[in-house]
Image: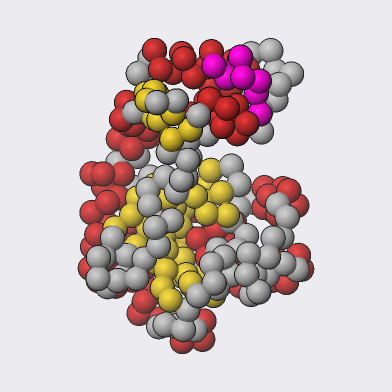
Amino acid sequence: MLNENDKEISLTFAKGLSVVLAFEGKDRSLSMTEIAKKVNLNRAVTRRLVRTLEQLGYVSYDRGRYELTPRILRLAQGFIEGRGISQLIQPILRQASHDIGESVSFAMLDDQDAVYVAHSFVPSKFTLNMVTVGSRAPLLPTAVGRAILAFLDDAKKEEIISSEQFKAYTEKTETNHDRFLELLTAVKQRRFSFAESEYVEGVSSLAVPVFGSNFRIIGAVSIIFPSGTYTEAEIEPDLVNKLKRCAADIGATF
């Protein structure tokens, strides 16, 4: 959360980044009015920010609409190369996908979401368009989110839980605070998380936490599948163990 009273930060720079983030998800192309509405700034300020990004080559303009350009990828290059996403983590995910026979993703905590930073796709298998590099998932109703949340320190965990509303995405979404804490306790004991039709109807997921040095939670690896493929009681130990090996190999790169 941005502290606007901190004299060492630039609010203008923060506003510029908010314009970049306005293009998240399906909003690939936006008008000036749409951008201003999404970032909650007046049109004059928004125009200056957008024009600056356009001059720098991060935004293009065509027939009243603005889009991000490929240059925006330079902003992520340091993270991708510094974390060894392409060189180290992607091959691990590919091997896990081959061994398991499912698409496997790796997500990390970003604010109060899990953001997918790497993904190995198995074309012949069930998948969701939302599971792509850069896409986000809420922490509370998803297996990948719970696999991360369960291993945060108590203060951080409660901060996230208390600030997030227990939204009922489906009829099966757990919305009771105490029962949710019991779920996290079970995740911590078993070292894996299972969520059945809690975020998207008909879609279930399995996730395993990824730890770095000193047992520090880094993120989680996960697979998704049609509900009914496995129940929580029927999750094969071999499947969980393969995901845990993948998680351990990724953790060793941090």
Instruction: Provide residue 8's location: percent of width, then percent of height.
Output: 64, 13
Residue 170 lies within the magenta run: no
Q: Is residue 9 above or below residue 252?
A: above
Horizontal relation, residue 173 to residue 132: left or right: right
Q: Is residue 194 above or below residue 82?
A: below
Instruction: Provide residue 197's location: percent of width, then percent of height.
Output: 55, 73
Q: Quadrant of residue 129?
A: bottom left
Image point 59% across, 70% down: which residue? 198
Q: Is residue 157 above or below residue 69?
A: below
Q: Is residue 78 above or below residue 234?
A: above
**What secondary structure characterizes most of the magenta part?**
helix
Q: Quadrant of the N terminus?
A: top right
Q: Which residues are magenta?
A: 40-47
Instruction: Provide residue 44's location: percent of width, then percent of height.
Output: 61, 14
Horizontal relation, residue 110 to residue 222: left or right: right
Q: Taking the image as drawn, is residue 187 in sight?
A: no
Q: Nearer the viewer, residue 129 or 217?
A: 129
Taking the view exactly as shown, the residue that stands out farthest to the bottom is 234
Horizontal relation, residue 234 to residue 149: left or right: left
